[in-house]
């Protein structure tokens, strides 16, 4: 039996650089049953399913839902069993919508359920064009990564960062997000992580964790263990975690070169933002990180219900005073299976239901404290203030000065240039509505 697994994208983004780990897990589990499995990240028009492939699965983000449905319809007509899963289906909101396009609908799944599902397909219990799709939900939250997902890392393209998971779940319950295992946080064994890092070729890797370093002792042990491997790592964490500045030298000693922080907005007090003045805390964190040769990226979001017209000046003030190396700003997307998305829908503020516009390039709802036009114009002006040629050039020189002419410096500057290009594309999309 053969299965093809796809994650679709519409524009080149982080998903192209940091390959989805779940696809690799599903691939390895299928292969352990003797299936031939293939995993691909591509655009809609690049999907090619061989005639002898029996099953096609899609990991679906909201912005690619429509593209997936179009493909699924064709594949079912061609006699393929179609499996749909991914973040777009983390809740009942989108179940009914997807039902006509698939034979299996996955909200969440563990290894036992996946293997049972493939066995049912092999035995002919699940066939193409099922009248009603089989619904799979990992209610007991038994998902865990395979023992050696690193087996698949060495097959990736040269520009893709291997992703090494260090935990499961997310301890926070942000209403604009719908992570798997929200509110829970399960650490992976240090020895397991070490072995995966050691067996993965290449120097640059992403340690995947919604809040890297949340457990201090585990983080110290991990950093000490992997330091001799001389790898360079990217991690994602929170202001609250790095407010303990003692963590930063430990991260540096372990090989962390890039930290992404979810700042979100200065107008709402989120648990992950820590306590105290946000700008002062960020400035201290970034200064300390720079002392240890670490680059810091701040991720911001505008358009939350706490954001009024003044939020753009507040974000720009935070950007300037904190000396953030890399700045990412997105307009809020009220995803259908989030608490915030549900509330905005119930309040009648959704103005666009085309999933392809749920891409940070369109305003699909009415903000609470400003108009759609004010959100659009404020976003465009803020990104112009941050990402203009003069700023990008001078900041790139500063990065070169601080880190030298190294491969890592080239990656950081390339990342900054990609953000510069991306903001231009977003501005063009917003102008065209």
Image (spheres, rainbow, N blue to C red):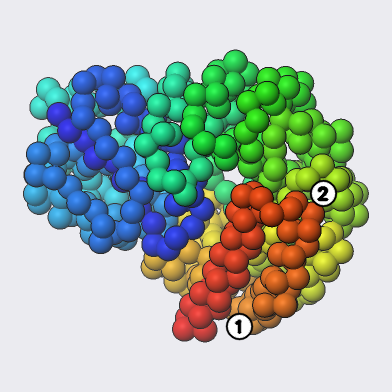
Q: Residue at position x 79%, y 54% from top?
A: 402
Q: Which mark is residue 290?
A: 2
Which of 17 and 433 lies nearest the eye of the viewer?
17
Q: Is residue 41 left or right of residue 358?
A: left
Q: Is residue 241 left or right of residue 80?
A: right
Which of 313 and 289 lies nearest the eye of the viewer?
289
Q: Residue at position x 57%, y 40% from top?
A: 204
Q: Secondary structure at mark 2?
A: helix
| Percent coordinates x, y for residue 420 in the rendering | 60, 70
Q: Is residue 292 left or right of residue 110?
A: right
- Residue 409 shows up from this direction: yes
Q: Secondary structure at mark 1?
A: helix
| Percent coordinates x, y for residue 240 in the rendering | 80, 41
| Percent coordinates x, y for residue 8 in the rendering | 35, 53
Q: Quadrant of residue 173?
A: top right
Nearer the N terminus, badge 1 or badge 2? 2
Q: Which residue is mark 1?
A: 373
Q: Residue at position x 19%, y 38% from top?
A: 55
* Above/below status of 396 relative to 180: below
């Amino acid at each position: 039996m053969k299965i093809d697994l796809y994650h679709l994208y519409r524009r080149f983004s982080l998903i192209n650089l940091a390959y989805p780990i779940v696809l690799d897990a599903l691939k390895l589990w299928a292969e352990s049953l003797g299936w031939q499995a293939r995993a691909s990240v591509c655009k809609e028009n690049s999907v090619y399913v061989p005639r002898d492939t029996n099953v096609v699965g899609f990991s679906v983000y909201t912005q690619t839902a429509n593209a997936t449905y179009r493909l699924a319809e064709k594949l079912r007509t061609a006699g393929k069993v179609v499996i749909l899963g991914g973040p777009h289906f983390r809740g009942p909101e989108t179940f009914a919508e997807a039902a006509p396009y698939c034979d299996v609908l996955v909200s969440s799944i563990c290894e036992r359920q996946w293997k049972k599902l493939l066995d049912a397909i092999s035995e002919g219990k699940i066939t193409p064009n099922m009248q009603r799709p089989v619904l799979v939900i990992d209610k007991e939250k038994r998902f865990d990564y395979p023992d050696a997902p690193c087996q698949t890392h060495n097959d990736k393209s040269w520009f893709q960062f291997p992703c090494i998971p260090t935990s499961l779940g997310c301890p926070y319950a942000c209403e604009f997000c719908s992570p798997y295992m929200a509110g829970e946080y399960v650490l992976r064994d240090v020895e397991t992580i070490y072995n995966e890092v050691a067996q993965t070729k290449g120097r640059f890797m992403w340690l995947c964790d919604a809040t890297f370093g949340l457990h201090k002792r585990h983080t110290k042990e991990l950093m000490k263990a992997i330091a001799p491997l001389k790898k360079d790592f990217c991690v994602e964490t929170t202001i609250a975690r790095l407010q303990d500045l003692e963590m930063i030298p430990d991260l540096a000693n372990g090989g962390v070169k890039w930290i992404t922080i979810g700042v979100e907005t200065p107008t709402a007090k989120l648990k992950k933002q820590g306590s105290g003045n946000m700008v002062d805390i960020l400035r201290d964190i970034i200064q300390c990180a720079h002392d240890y040769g670490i680059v810091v990226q701040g991720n911001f979001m505008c358009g939350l219900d706490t954001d009024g017209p003044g939020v753009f000046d507040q974000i720009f003030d935070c950007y300037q005073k904190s000396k953030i190396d890399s700045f990412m700003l997105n307009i809020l997307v009220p995803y259908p299976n989030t608490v915030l998305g549900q509330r905005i829908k119930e309040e009648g503020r959704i103005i666009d239901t085309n999933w392809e516009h749920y891409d940070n390039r369109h305003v699909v709802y009415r903000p609470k404290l400003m108009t759609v036009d004010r959100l659009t114009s404020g976003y465009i002006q803020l990104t112009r203030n941050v990402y203009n040629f003069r700023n990008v050039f001078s900041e790139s020189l500063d990065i070169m000065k601080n880190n030298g002419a190294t491969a890592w410096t080239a990656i950081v500057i390339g990342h900054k240039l990609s953000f510069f290009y991306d903001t231009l594309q977003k501005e063009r999309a917003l102008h065209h509505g």
